[in-house]
Image: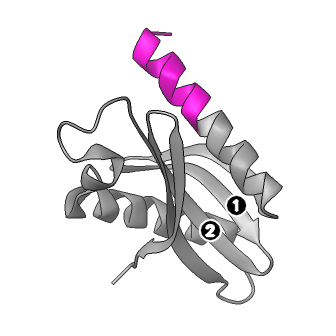
Amino acid sequence: MTTAQARGAAAEAAAAEFLAARGLALVERNFRVRGGEIDLICRDGETIVFVEVRLRRRSDYGGAAASILAAKQARIVLAARHWLARRRLRQSPFCRFDCVLIDGDRLEWLKNAFSAD
C-alpha cells in the first residue's frame, strides 16, 4: 500500500467512525464496479446513504469539496445504481449522496451533497 493509499484508508476509517457516532450504520466499504466506486455505504434509518470521502492536506486548489466535480458525481451515481440493482430490494429505498470532507484536521459532513438527477 502506498502512502497515499494509506492516508485514503485512514480518512475513510475516520469518516466511518464519525458517521457511526452520529447514528449511521456502515453497510459496505469501497464498493467498486466498472466505471465507478463508492467509499462508504451506510444506513441512516430507512435511508441508504452513499458517501464520498475526500481528503486534502492543503486547500491550494479549492480543498476537498472543490474536487468532487460532475464527472466524479456521475461515477458515484453509476456505482450506486449497480449496488441497488444487485440487492433487488422489494421496494425502492430512499437514497441520498453525502460527502465527508477532510481538509487538514477539519472534518465536514455534507448531507445531500448532490443528487442522482
Residue occupying the point 33% across, 57% down: 75
Q: Over which residues does the magenta segment extend?
A: 1-11
Residue 50 is tagged as: none
- Amino acid carrying label 2: it is Val
Taking the image as shown, residue 63 lies to the left or right of residue 44, namely left
Q: Is residue 20 above or below residue 4?
A: below
Q: Mark 1 points at which residue?
A: 42
Q: How many marks?
A: 2
Crowding near the residue tagged with mark 1, few <14, some 14–19, many ≥20 C-alpha atoms within 10 Å = many
The one of 79 and 95 positioned closer to us in this rendering: 95
Q: Nearer the viewer, residue 8 or 18?
A: 18
- The 10 Å Cα crowd at callout 2, few under 14, some 14 to 19, many 20 or more, is many
Q: Give x and y (percent) for residue 111.
A: 54, 72
Q: Which residue lies furthest to the bottom in this view?
A: 91
Front one among 74 and 57: 57
Amino acid type indicated by mark 1: Cys
Q: Where is residue 63 in the image (x, y as percent from the top left)?
A: 29, 45
In the figure, is residue 19 to the left or right of 114? right
- Residue 117 lies in the magenta-colored region: no
Q: Residue furthest front?
A: 105
Quadrant assignment for the C terminus: bottom left
Residue 7: in magenta span: yes
Q: What element carries label 1?
A: strand
For the stretch drawn in magenta, the main secondary structure is helix
Query: Which circle marks residue 49 in the picture?
Result: 2
Asked if marks 1 and 2 touch (Cβ < 8 Å), the reply is yes
Which secondary structure, mark 2? strand
Q: Which residue is depicted at the point 48% across and 70% down?
A: 81
